[in-house]
């Protein structure tokens, strides 16, 4: 009998819920009145009612034991909140689903006519949809009026400038990518080390020398590391750089520049390396393990992997950073991608907006930038960073290695976006071709045709 | 003749048991072994036993909170889901009425709606109800997710119960509801328990809706633990597997304990039938 | 006359039906009804990142343009559709017979049957994240065991399971197709609820165990086989996690499923093409209904329905 009572109660509750719910769910389609009061309702109750309240959401939820960088980021945020506690209430909220969770929630929020006050999207690009929906703030005026702020965001200024002349996101760190090599293995094979390479021909020669000595030059998977190599090779000539720069807006893949890059991937890389050195799964981490275990001579991954060198099987002292050669002797290239970071709601009042701008200025200031590099979190975009000073401020060998890698990337003659940031959806399509290129079931022409078909289908 | 037959039957039986054990134990054995290895891989014993993942989970993370939240959400949503669906399934299995095929079709359709499509409206509705970032909201959503599968399971089970049972009860003066609660529910305990287990398992592992609907750490459920070991730059497989073991072992233990209760309730039902 | 009809309408039986169905229907409306309508309606619109808040009707002249594109230019969708149909057929041909055989074998209550039953459910209990990682590892050429086994039989074969389109398809298939633990549990529950008196009579008549299985148990659990078939077919049709974790649709998009296509097109792309994804959703939905209809028809017994 008890069960019956419960179910009847439940039925009533559900009914009531639905009636209210239906009333609500019909609203979004019909009205465009955004629920402006919603963020306020969600905000943790502020004790000091006078001060403006800003909720900042980030994805650094990891425990300190698991990822020290996360705890350090939280500390950097907290310092800002404490510094300004008399002016505004800066609530720092960690999203337990990380950057992807923040992005998914933002899409749901947008559909419901809401948006975060300010959030760090950690590379997940919300700006096209959010700006089209008019939900986010153009930061360009604030960047233009403050040279220090503009310097602080460095490459992000140009990279995130949209066709309409707006900048919707800046970031305190960038993905700085060159590659790593194992000096001992290069010497063992008698190959020229990447630091001395003049052009890509030296890469080919080194790969052949390594293979002749029975050393696998590199492990790749059908994703991230192979894409880094492709993007790096794309910087070889002016034509090729132009193609890379056009990225997702290219009109055709049937260009000599692109065909040259794919031909390089197939014949100079994929066909030369062993089967066990190519993992067709896009998110396998084997390629890193192989390098740090001392089994392969090169690793295509970002500067942050400096930390993995500690006590690795390859020998800490053998792991060295490098950046890409080009076909112009002596000129070097690196991949520096800002991507989507801080995004601010356009629905905030003046005081809240000012606080958000203040926060972004703080995050991109040289002081915080130095911390981000010194703590080993990543590379900062700022143009005013004194790498010598940072290098002197750290003691740990892996921190010194990271600083060195960042300095190297910063010194590149050509700085370009990574493949994903440049080519958007095409990145996934391009990487799906590697397996076919490796086993020879696909030719360069096939890849071009299929990518053009995908382009046609997408519109 | 009969003996020989039995032998072949037994060989076949043991053969199937062996196959099932191999394909089922391998995954969990691999996960457990891997959780002690620095670099998970292969099915050999670890060269060096590593406990880092477990140490992090039990000392650094508020594992009790995750468990508490998951238990509350899973238990309540499973209870609501099974109660509600068993009522509907019973009506659909037993009663004749006009819109019956429509109702059955309606539940069927829920099988094939992509979850990408339901998330926006649900998020919005819960926002309007003020149920975002609450357990109540998540319980509400979980109660409705997968109603079709539960519905089919229970309906098939009710169909297999002889009609005479309720008819006898009706003659004794029981109301329809009375017949359901006093006669049908007790007999259907094994079927309902099985359905409840399926629902509970799904809800225990669900993360997409939890990650969107729950914003504060205090409300988060157990699957969030996995994220601790996946940073932007690298995965810690050893830690991830420790988290999987921690979240899965209790379910396996509870299941094994419960399965004995099934068997008992089964025999109880059989005597009556 | 009129009076009695009214009385019947509000009679106990109808009241019972109404109140028992109500909560289920309320749940359906709250969670599924609106999305269902929206999926259908937006398949006739332009709806992507440019107009995320306001889907635009395509107009009567271009009404089916989303559908047209799927079937004419969208190679990924076409592959996804074919794969999903294949996976449904494979669950019917492999998973269901295998699970039924296991259930019949376990029902003999030989030593260890309880352990096997409990073990069989484990792959269904572990989160798909774990299952995905396990198989990713099994198939990995450097750490996995498949490459090693092939190397043992054919030295120098250097097999890479996930690199070729055909083997990658089967790799995904075998990451889920044998795991019928929960279906097996349901079948067992049903077998045990068969009245033992029925067997005894047959046993006395000298029926072999095989005959008991074939002539008595199988027909009696037929409705439940129908039910688990619907569930399994549904799983095959909606297959998503295994693909996202093991192959990510690759190599060369050869292992796309409908669900993976829908996710990629809607959420997994900067274009957020919800209209196209929902169009694929409509097709998946209709396919599902046809499937359930067919399965129900195949397993309908004179007793049920």
Image: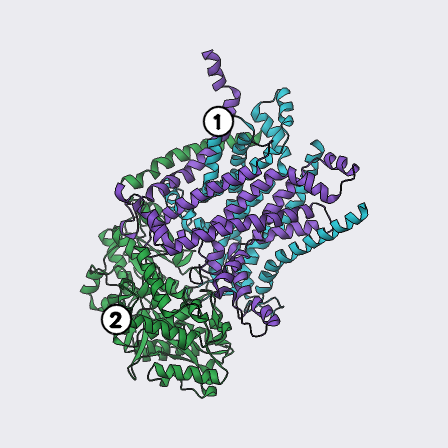
Mark 2: few/some/many CA within 10 Å (<14, 14-19, 20+): some
Tell me residue A278's x, y (percent): 47, 71
Q: Colour of chain C?
A: purple
Between B63 and B118, the one nearer to me in the picture = B118
- In the picture, the quarter occupied by the C terminus of chain A is bottom left
Residue under mark 1: which chain is it in?
Answer: C
Circle 2: element type: helix
Taking the spot 47% from the left edge, 19% from the top edge, the residue there is: C9
Question: Is residue C272 something that shows in the picture?
Answer: yes
Circle 1: element type: helix
Tell me residue A220's x, y (percent): 44, 71
Residue occupied by mark 1: C18
Q: Colour of chain B?
A: cyan
Q: Colour of chain A?
A: green
Outermost residue to the top: C1
> What is the number of the mark on residue C144?
none
Relative placement, left or right, of A43 versus B55 is: left
């Amino acid at each position: 009998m008890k069960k019956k009572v419960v179910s009847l109660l439940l039925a009533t509750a559900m009914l009531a819920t639905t009636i209210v719910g239906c009333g609500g769910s019909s609203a979004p389609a019909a009205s465009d009145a955004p629920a402006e009061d919603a963020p306020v309702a969600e905000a943790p109750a502020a004790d000091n009612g006078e001060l403006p309240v800003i909720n900042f959401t980030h994805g650094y939820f990891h425990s300190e034991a698991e990822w020290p960088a996360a705890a350090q980021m939280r500390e950097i945020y907290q310092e800002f909140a404490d510094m300004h506690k008399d002016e505004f209430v800066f609530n720092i909220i960690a999203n337990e689903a990380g950057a992807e969770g923040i992005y998914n929630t933002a899409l749901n929020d947008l559909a419901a006519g809401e948006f975060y006050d300010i959030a760090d999207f950690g590379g997940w690009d919300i700006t096209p949809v959010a700006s089209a929906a008019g939900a986010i703030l153009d930061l360009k005026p604030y960047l233009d009026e403050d040279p220090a702020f503009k310097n602080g965001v460095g490459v992000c200024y140009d990279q995130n400038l949209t066709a309409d002349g707006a900048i919707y996101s800046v970031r305190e760190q960038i993905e700085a990518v060159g590659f790593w090599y194992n000096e001992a293995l290069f010497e063992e094979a008698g190959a020229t080390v990447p630091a001395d390479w003049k052009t890509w021909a030296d890469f080919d020669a080194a790969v052949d020398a390594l293979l002749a000595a029975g050393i696998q030059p590199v492990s790749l998977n059908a994703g991230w590391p192979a894409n880094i190599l492709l993007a790096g090779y794309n910087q070889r000539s002016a034509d090729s750089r132009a193609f890379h720069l056009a990225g997702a807006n290219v009109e055709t893949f049937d260009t000599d520049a692109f065909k040259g890059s794919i031909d390089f991937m197939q014949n100079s890389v994929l066909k030369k390396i062993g089967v066990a050195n190519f993992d067709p799964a896009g998110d396998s981490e084997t390629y890193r393990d192989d390098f740090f275990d001392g089994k392969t001579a090169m690793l295509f991954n970002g500067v942050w992997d400096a930390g993995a060198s500690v006590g690795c099987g390859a020998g800490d002292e053998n792991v060295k950073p490098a950046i890409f050669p080009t076909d112009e002797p002596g000129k070097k290239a690196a991949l520096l991608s800002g991507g989507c970071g801080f995004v601010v709601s356009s629905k905030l009042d003046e005081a809240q907006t000012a606080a958000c701008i203040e926060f972004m200025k703080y995050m991109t200031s040289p002081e915080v930038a130095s911390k981000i590099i010194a703590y080993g979190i990543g590379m900062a975009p700022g143009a005013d960073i004194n790498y010598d000073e940072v290098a002197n401020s750290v003691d740990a060998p892996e921190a010194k290695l990271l600083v060195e890698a960042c300095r190297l990337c910063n010194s590149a003659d050509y700085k370009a976006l990574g493949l994903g940031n440049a080519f958007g959806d095409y990145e996934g399509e391009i990487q799906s071709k590697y397996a076919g290129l490796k086993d020879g079931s696909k030719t360069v022409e096939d890849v071009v045709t299929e990518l053009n078909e995908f382009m046609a289908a997408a519109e | 003749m009969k003996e020989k037959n039995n032998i072949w039957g037994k060989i076949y039986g043991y053969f199937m048991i062996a196959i099932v054990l191999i394909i089922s134990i391998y995954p969990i054995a691999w996960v457990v072994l891997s959780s002690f290895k620095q670099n998970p891989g292969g099915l050999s014993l670890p060269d060096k036993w590593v406990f880092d993942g477990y140490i992090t989970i039990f000392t650094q993370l508020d594992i009790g909170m995750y468990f508490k939240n998951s238990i509350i959400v899973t238990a309540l949503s499973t209870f609501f889901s099974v109660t509600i669906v068993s009522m509907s399934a019973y009506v659909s299995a037993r009663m004749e009425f006009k819109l019956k095929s429509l109702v059955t079709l309606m539940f069927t359709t829920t099988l094939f709606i992509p979850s990408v499509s339901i998330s926006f409206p649900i998020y919005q509705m819960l926002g309007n109800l003020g149920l975002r970032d609450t357990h109540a909201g998540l319980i509400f959503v979980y109660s409705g997710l997968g109603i079709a599968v539960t519905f089919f399971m229970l309906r098939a089970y009710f169909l297999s119960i002889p009609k005479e049972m309720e008819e006898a009860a009706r003659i004794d003066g029981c109301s329809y509801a009375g017949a359901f609660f006093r006669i049908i529910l007790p007999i259907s305990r094994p079927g309902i328990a099985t359905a409840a287990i399926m629902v509970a398992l799904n809800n225990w592992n669900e993360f997409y809706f939890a990650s969107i609907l729950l914003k504060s750490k205090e409300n988060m459920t157990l699957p969030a633990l996995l994220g601790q070991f996946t940073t932007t730059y690298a995965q810690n497989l050893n830690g991830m597997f420790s988290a999987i073991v921690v979240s899965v072992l209790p379910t396996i233990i509870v299941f094994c304990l419960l399965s004995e209760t099934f068997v008992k309730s089964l025999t109880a039902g059989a005597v009556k039938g | 006359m009129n009076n009695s009809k009214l009385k019947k309408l509000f009679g106990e039986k109808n009241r019972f039906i109404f109140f028992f169905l109500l909560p289920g229907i309320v749940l359906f409306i709250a969670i599924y009804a609106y999305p269902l309508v929206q999926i259908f309606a937006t398949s006739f619109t332009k709806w992507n990142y440019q107009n995320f808040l306001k889907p635009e009707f395509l107009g009567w002249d271009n009404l089916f343009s989303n559908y047209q594109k799927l079937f004419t230019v969208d190679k990924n969708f076409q592959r996804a559709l074919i794969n999903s149909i294949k996976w449904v057929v494979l669950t019917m041909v492999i998973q269901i017979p295998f699970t039924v055989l296991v259930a019949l074998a376990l029902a003999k209550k030989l030593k260890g049957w309880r352990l096997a039953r409990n073990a069989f459910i484990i792959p269904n209990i572990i989160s798909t994240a774990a299952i995905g990682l396990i198989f990713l590892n099994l198939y990995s050429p450097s750490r996995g065991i498949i490459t090693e086994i092939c190397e043992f039989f054919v030295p120098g074969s250097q097999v890479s399971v996930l690199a070729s389109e055909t083997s990658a398809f089967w790799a995904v298939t075998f990451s889920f197709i044998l795991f019928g633990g929960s279906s097996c549990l349901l079948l067992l529950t049903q077998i045990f609820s068969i009245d033992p008196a029925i067997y005894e009579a047959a046993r006395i008549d000298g029926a072999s165990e095989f005959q008991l299985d074939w002539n008595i148990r199988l027909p009696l659990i037929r409705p439940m086989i129908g039910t688990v078939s619907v569930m399994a077919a549904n799983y095959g049709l909606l297959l998503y996690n295994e693909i996202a974790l093991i192959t990510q649709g690759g190599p060369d998009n050869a292992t796309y499923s409908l669900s993976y296509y829908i996710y990629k097109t809607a959420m997994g792309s900067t274009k957020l093409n919800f209209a196209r994804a929902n169009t694929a959703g409509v097709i998946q939905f209709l396919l599902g209904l046809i499937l359930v209809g067919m399965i129900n028809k195949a397993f309908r017994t004179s007793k049920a329905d």
